[in-house]
Every structure is written in structure tokens, then in C-alpha cells.
Amino acid sequence: MSTNTLATVLHVDLDAFFVSMELLRQPELYGKPVAVGWSGNRGVISTCTYEARAFGVHSAMPSSQAKRLCPGLIFLEPDFGYYQAASDKFHAILRDFTPVVEPAGADEAYMDVRGSERIHGSPREIAASLRSRIRQEIGITASVGVSVNKLVSKVASDAGKPDGLVVVESGEEAAFLAPRPIRELPGVGPKTSESLARLGVHTIGDLAHMPLGALEARFGRHGAGLRRRALGEFDDPVHSGHGAARSISRETTFDTDEANAARMHAIIWGQAERVAADLARQGRAGRTVTLKLRFPPFETLTRSATPGHGLERSEEIAVAAIALFERAWNANGRRPVRLVGVSVTNLQARGRQLALGEQPGRDELDQGIRELRGRFGEGIIVRGAELPARDSLP
């Protein structure tokens, strides 16, 4: 059981984050089926409006399938720099209410507001204040779940979507969860759900009432854990500061397999610029560069290099990534490529000094590109060789 006996744990989730941010820039699209993603043959939906979801469209769905389900679906290219600025603001708002914030992604986080009541009010009042500030300062809506632990709060925020607040008071966890479909229980994926359905389990309440012996016979030790979750028991506290990104990456999937070296070099340069911009926004550097290549149909390989110093600038990331690309591509017969990606890992605080004789011109160029994209969007400045791939830019 959770050691927390008060409903002070919040799960805060921005509603349809990427597409909500795009609608701020294009309000004429409100009320229409809109998706953020790439519309090409190999594109994937990142997120979509609730109008699109009414047609069965959802995140991670192939764009081709989404277009069949919703012929009028409007596609918008992602602008990750724009979203990151809003994400930073979102997490800053949360930390104004408590230092115990555990990020769970760009658009969601857990909070424990014990000890904040004298300043900010009850957990319900804090949740309402959060939602109000997010709407006023970012311009989009958020759903919040409040309960004694992270698991129930997550289910509660999902139940409140969009733009809702659901509070589950202490002692009400099992009753709240019982009528909900089994797939809404965190930790129950498609395969587990299918196995449970064969046992006659279709709701979380069904699972809570299953004999423990039957669950352990089917799922082993995992069976007891499933039953505890179904009862609303969860003992992992909110971890302050956990969930920070361990890597920063960009990928491009080509609509048709690509074999032009110059174009792939340009794509890698563009990815390196975007990775460097993300690093700068977070005040971080990376020690390792990783190149990802995918050959058709789904043969994927990665190659990494660790130069021995923190990487911050787009030029040094691109040079390292292109060298990895050339070695890997040559070793694989320079075959056409389906996907190429660049990432940096082993993140650390920034602290680079200019090398002897180095001029800061490249840093200024990187900053200028970041500012342009921040003001006008990712597509405002693009390398010429990237243009044929605009539908699949990261």
C-alpha cells in the first residue's frame, strides 16, 4: 500500500499538446479534424484533435490509415522547438506550487502537494489553480487527476479528458477504478488484456475480484501486482526531478528509400541543428553522438562515438554523425536508406570553452537559426537539400 493516506498526488496532463499548440497559431482550424504528423506514405500521427479521434484516429497510427478513417484530416508538420518552449513553461508553473514534481514527458507530470496547502490551498484548489494558470499563460487546457498515489491519479486525469478535474478521495480508489475498462489500468497492455479477457476479466473491478491463486497461476508474480493495482494500491512515491530526458534525438523517415549521399548529409546537418537547439534550451551538452540507420524493410542499426568532451554546437554534432553515417553506409554497400536519425546521450551541464584560435561565429549562427525557428516555426529556414523531404522533416 502507498504510505500516503491523503489525496495529495496530482497527475497533470496537457490535452492533445502538440495539436493544441498548433491551434493557437491557426485558430481557424478549431473544431476540425487536425493531426500533427507527416502525411507521407510512411508518416505517423503524433497527436490529433478530439474531432479526429471521433473517426478512430489516434497517436502512433500510420498516416495512411488515418487518412482512410478520416478523409478530411488536416495534417500539420511538427514544430518541436515551439512545443519545447511551452513544455518548459508548463513545468515551471508546476514547480511554483511544490518542489516535488516528477516529469513524465513534455506534456505531463506527477506532483505531491503535501505541505503546500497553507500557501496554495487544498489539493483540489491547487489543481484548479494549475489549470487556470496553464490556460492563461500557455493558452491550452490541461486535465488533472488527484488521489493518494500516482497510479490512481493517472487514471483519474485520463477520465477527466479533455479539460477536466477528477478527485478520488482516500479510501475511494477501488470503487473509482472498478467500472473502468481493463485497458485503462496502467501496466495492462494489449497482450495482458487479451489474456485477462480469456479469464472473463473486462473491467478493473473484474480483476480486483479475481482469486489471487488464479492470477498467479496465469501470470506468476505479476498476477499479485496486477490485483494490487486493480485495488488502487501503488507504493511508488513522486520522485522530485525524475523523468528528465536522458537523450535528445531527431529522426527522418523517407517517403521513398533514399540513396543520395549529399541529401542524407544535409538531412543529418538539419537534425544536428535541431538537436543542438534543444540542448541549448535545456542548458545541457551531450558526450555521445549516435547515428541510427534503417534499411528496408526494417533492418535497423546504430553507431555511436564519444569524443571525450561535451558536445553543444550543431557543427560538431553533425561532423561526428556524418562520419558515423559514412562508415556505416559503406559497410552496408551504400544501400538505399529508409530512415536516418541523430541523437546525443550522456547529457551534462553546459560548460564549453573556446578552443585556441576558435572564433565564436558558428555559435552566433546557431543562435540566429534558433531564434528564427523559435519566432516563425521550424520551416522558416531549411537546408536546400532537405526541401524534397519537407513532408518528413523532424
Image: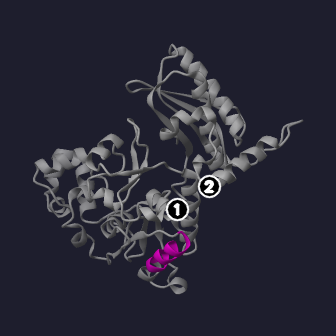
- The image position of residue 189, as x and y in percent, is 27, 48
Q: Earlier in the sequence, mark 2 or mark 1?
A: 1
Which residue is at a point 72% across and 37% down the rendered structure image?
A: 309
Q: The residue under label 2 is which amino acid type?
A: Phe
Q: Which residue is mark 1?
A: 25
Between 143 and 47, the one lying in front of the other is 47
Residue 137 drawn in magenta: yes
Between 272 and 169, the one lying in front of the other is 272
Which residue is at a point 40% across and 40% down the rendered structure image?
A: 43
- The image position of residue 192, as x and y in percent, is 22, 47
- The image position of residue 81, as x and y in percent, is 58, 52
Q: The residue under label 1 is which amino acid type?
A: Arg
Circle 1 packing at 10 Å, graded few (<14), some (14-19), many (20+), is few
Label 2 close to label 1 by CB (< 8 Å): no
Circle 2 packing at 10 Å, graded few (<14), some (14-19), many (20+), is few
Quadrant of res 204: bottom left
Q: Is residue 220 visible?
A: no
Quadrant of res 159: bottom left
Q: What stretch of residues is rendered in magenta?
A: 127-138
Instruction: Look at the picture and state if 79 lies above or below 41.
Output: below
Which residue is at a point 23% across and 58% down the rendered structure image?
A: 227
Which residue is at a point 42% across and 71% down the rendered structure image?
A: 9
Q: Is residue 116 visible?
A: yes
Q: Which mark is residue 376?
A: 2
Q: Main secondary structure of the magenta part?
A: helix
Q: CA distance from mark 2 to mark 1?
A: 10 Å
Q: Regarding mark 2 in the picture, which secondary structure is present there?
A: helix
- The image position of residue 97, as x and y in percent, is 54, 75
